[in-house]
Structure formats: C-alpha cells, structure tokens
Image: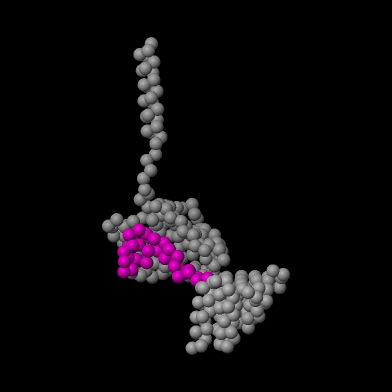
C-alpha cells in the first residue's frame, strides 16, 4: 500500500513538472522591438507606433527591402501615425486620426502613402490603392553615418511645423507636416480677450512671437502689467516688444525695471536676460 502511495505521489509530481514546463514562457528580446513616440505638436500631439528592425550586416534598400514594392515601413505590423488635429501633409489636408504609413522605396525617389485601413497590418499582399488617403513622392538623402536600427523621429519642430524622418542604414527620407494653429489661436484670442478672465499676457506673447500687430501687443501687455505690476516676466515681454518696434529708449527703460524686480526676487536668469536686452538696444 505504501509503495502504491509513493508511486502515485511521484506521478503527480512528474505531471506537475511537465505541465509547468509546457505553460512556462521563455521571455527573450524581440528581434524588431516595438516603439511608440509621442510628441507635443501645435495644439495637440503626434504619435507614431512602429517596430524597429536592424540591418545586421545586410544590404537594406534594394535587397531586404526591394525597390519598387510596397513596404510596411518597419517590421511586423504596419507603422501607424496619429494626428491629434487636422494637418497638412506635404501640402494636402489630412483630418485628425490614425493612419498606417506604407511606402515604395526606390533608388532615387520614394512614394509614401497614408492608408485608411488599419486592419491590413503587415500583409502588403492585400494592399489596395483605393484605401489610400494620400500618396506623395519625396527624395531620399544619404547620411554620413550608418543607422543600424530603423528609426522614425520628429525633427525641426516649430509651433506649427514638424518633419517626420525615416532613417535606416545610410538613407534618410522625410516629409513635412503643418498645422494651421494661427486661425484657431486668433479666434480664441478674439473670443476670450473680451471676457473677465482676460489672457492679456498670452495674447501679447503670441502677437510678439508671430509678428502680428505690435501696437495691439503693447496695449495687452500694459494691461497685464496693470494687473500684476511686479511681474518682471511680463515686463520683459514688453521690453522685447518695444525692441521689435525699435523703441530703443522705451525698451531700455522697461528692461531696467525688470532688473530691479527680478533682483528683488533673486531671479538671476531674468536679470541676465534684461541686461542682454539693454546691451542689444544700445548698439
């Protein structure tokens, strides 16, 4: 009886070990790891999700990635880009939303497509041109350094423009994205400046940064100063606006106020900026 019990116990132990071995998952690094990049852009964000293959000594374009054929622009599934607001891609209107990026590499030019059907994934054999939102052609450039792992980045970012770059081996391809934020911001300023909670400083700053009506910018910044006379950062904005207006005397006088107030608050950065502005106006 005891022998049977031992045999039964051993059988259970072996079964448990076997089951554990079957269910165990060996975690290893993905050969083409997934990356998601999210960049604040204009009044929202741009998000890109893609998998990153590596060259591993191979010739990429014209071999691993054939010329003249649709490529998923990465590894595994389709590369996806999400625009948080309406934009223009290479001059064409694109509504806010998520699109797949497919491409057709060639030696001297690339065709890049924004694709509406997100279910296609990496199966380019089922690619249908009628599902394209947009197709455009760009020229590849040669980089001085080799990029081992396929990389997508967002470069040359301004308040309303950004360049999407695809880089691998010694090839870089890029396309431009533009957002029309000026119309939206101007409308917001018009709608809010007349209300009780007046964003005078923000409105004046936007007018200054974007070369709009500087006389109006001064009017608004003066109202912001009246609301908070010791706000040296607001006074510095006024000095910058006066400098752009070529009101040298006024800019120097305002910058001197900044130095006094910023010194009281022990803010050396603003003291330095005000002194630099004074020097520029005295040239």
Q: Pick the residue in front: 12 or 95.
A: 12
Depicted 136 relative to depicted 21: above or below = below
Where in the figure is residue 199, as x and y percent of width and height?
65, 71
Depicted 241 relative to depicted 90: above or below = below
Where in the figure is residue 158, as x and y percent of width and height?
50, 71
Inspect this view and state whether residue 242 appears: no
Identified at 38% across, 24% down, the residue is 13
Identified at 46% across, 53% down, the residue is 120
Identified at 31% across, 57% down, the residue is 55
Q: Which part of the image, by quadrant, shows the N terminus?
A: top left
Q: Is residue 51 left or right of residue 211?
A: left
Inspect this view and state whether residue 248 appears: yes
Instruction: Give the residues drawn in magenta, as a range.
Output: 143-172
Tell me, yes or no, whether the highlighted magenta stretch contains residue 156.
yes
Identified at 51% across, 73% down, the residue is 269
Q: Pick the residue in front: 171 or 197.
A: 197
Tell me, yes or no, whether the highlighted magenta stretch contains residue 54.
no
């Amino acid at each position: 009886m005891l022998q049977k019990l031992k045999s039964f116990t051993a059988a259970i132990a072996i079964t448990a070990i076997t089951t554990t071995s079957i269910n165990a998952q060996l975690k290893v690094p993905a050969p083409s790891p997934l990356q998601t990049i999210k960049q604040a852009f204009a009044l929202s964000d741009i998000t890109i999700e893609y998998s990153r293959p590596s060259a591993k000594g191979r010739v990429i374009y014209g071999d691993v990635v054939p010329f003249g054929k649709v490529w998923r622009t990465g590894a595994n599934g389709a590369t996806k880009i999400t625009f948080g607001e309406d934009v223009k891609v290479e001059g064409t209107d694109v509504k806010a939303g998520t699109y797949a990026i497919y491409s057709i590499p060639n030696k001297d030019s690339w065709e890049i497509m924004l694709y509406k059907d997100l279910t296609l994934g990496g199966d380019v054999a089922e690619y249908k041109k009628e599902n394209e939102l947009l197709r455009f052609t760009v020229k590849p450039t040669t980089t001085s350094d080799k990029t081992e792992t396929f990389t997508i980045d967002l470069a040359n970012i301004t308040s309303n423009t950004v360049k999407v770059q695809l880089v691998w081996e010694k090839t870089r391809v890029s396309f431009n994205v533009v957002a029309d934020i000026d119309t939206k911001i101007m409308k917001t300023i018009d709608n809010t400046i007349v209300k009780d909670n007046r964003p005078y400083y923000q409105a004046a700053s936007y007018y200054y940064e974007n070369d709009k009506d500087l006389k109006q910018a001064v009017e608004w910044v003066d109202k912001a100063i009246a609301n908070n006379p010791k706000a040296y950062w607001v006074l510095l904005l006024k000095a910058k606006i006066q400098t752009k207006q070529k009101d040298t005397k006024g800019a120097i006088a305002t910058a001197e106020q900044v130095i006094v107030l910023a010194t009281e608050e022990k803010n050396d950065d603003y003291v330095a900026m005000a002194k630099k502005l004074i020097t520029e106006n005295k040239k």
